[in-house]
Image (spheres, rainbow, N blue to C red):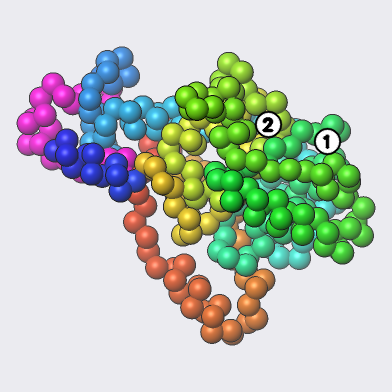
Amino acid sequence: ILQQLIEASLRGDSCIEANSAQLEALGDLVVSSEVAATQVAPCVHDQQGLALYRYWHLEQRLAQQICRLKRQTIQAVDAEQYQDLLSDEHQQAALKMVLQQDLSIITGGPGTGKTYTLARIIAALNQTIPDIRIAMAAPTGKAAQRMQEALQNSFNDPKLLESGLITDELRNQTTQTLHRLLGMGNRQIPRFHPKQPLPYDVIVVDEASMLDLNLATLLFEAVPEQCRLILLGDANQLASVDVGSVLADLQNVQSLQHNRVNLQTSQRFKDGALIGKMAQFIQNIPVKALGSMEFIAETC
């Protein structure tokens, strides 16, 4: 049973199914989630299944931070004056969501305009909130570089330039890896954490599908009060290399549906294009999420 748990973690899964006979065979090596709150054991069993204590504990920490962001209030920004920046209804919904909430999840397949939408969201926030501090990050250096290139291209869009919202600060906006953002050195101990949160008003994470359970937990714990956190990505694309598929799980949590907008209209292909139909077909193939955080719904 322990070997199955380890093999599951190598596949990126945080837990496995276990019957009563298997739990009995583990004996003192496993405790219930209620007991695990005060007692450490190698394995923990709850309604989601059997997990190693490390991953169960990470999920609990992450759930607590998500609920913290859900509960806190933030300065809402009137989205009506910026609606003309976007013509697609889903992109407009994403703009309104970010301007009024602290936790926002923007998903969508290739070509649906995630970065295009983000550029207008950031421009609107920069215009409305004085001296706003913005951090742009991605799980890997390559993803961070692509993010910066795509964002700067979007900032140079003629329509956005005509709006007068693009400032020198936005043109000079840089991106970085999440490890650098959190100040993680060779020992992988973050400089920023709950007692010393990140000094930003907006934190944007691109390619959020690559967020594993450990990195996501460290990130959420370092988000300060009154800070907007924006997760951008496509759960059907790049997967995390460690345990957990955080973006895929979060977008399926019912209590977070008001915190998520899925961009659906492809801006890359013309209507009826065969390659566009093929891309849509592939995206609609059911994918079994690795790991589950449905307990977030109950915790919230």
Amino acid type, label 1: Ile
Where is residue 136, by image quadrant?
Answer: top right
Magenta stretch in the rendered image: 13-34
Q: Quadrant of residue 173?
A: top right
Q: Is residue 40 above or below residue 238?
A: above
Which element type, helix, strand or loop, lies under badge 1?
loop
Nearer-N-terminus badge (2/1): 1
Q: Are marks 2 and 1 in contact (CB under 8 Å)?
A: no
Q: Is residue 74 left or right of residue 222?
A: right
Residue 180 lies left or right of residue 150; in this view the side is: left
Q: Residue at x 55, y 64 (%)?
A: 109
Question: Where's residue 143, x and y in %?
Answer: 59, 51
Q: Is residue 31 magenta?
A: yes
- Is residue 85 in view from this perspective? yes
What residue sits right under mark 1 in the picture?
129
Q: Which mark is residue 227?
A: 2
> Toward which corner of the image does residue 32 lie, by quadrant?
top left
Q: Residue at x 62, y 22 (%)?
A: 197
- Is any atom of residue 80 visible in this view? no
Q: Residue furthest front?
A: 186
**Disc 1 packing (10 Å; few <14; some 14–19; many ≥20):** few
Left or right of 161? Residue 23 is: left
Q: Position of residue 101 (x, y in %)?
A: 66, 39
In the picture, the quarter occupied by the N terminus is top left
- Please tell me whether residue 123 is drawn above or below residue 51 in the rendered image: below
Percent across and percent down for residue 40 are 27, 18
Q: Secondary structure at mark 2?
A: loop
Q: Real-space Cα distance between discs 2 and 1? A: 12 Å
Amino acid type at circle 2 is: Cys
Instruction: Give the x, y percent position of residue 223.
Output: 61, 29
**Residue beneath the point at 54% across and 84% down:** 274
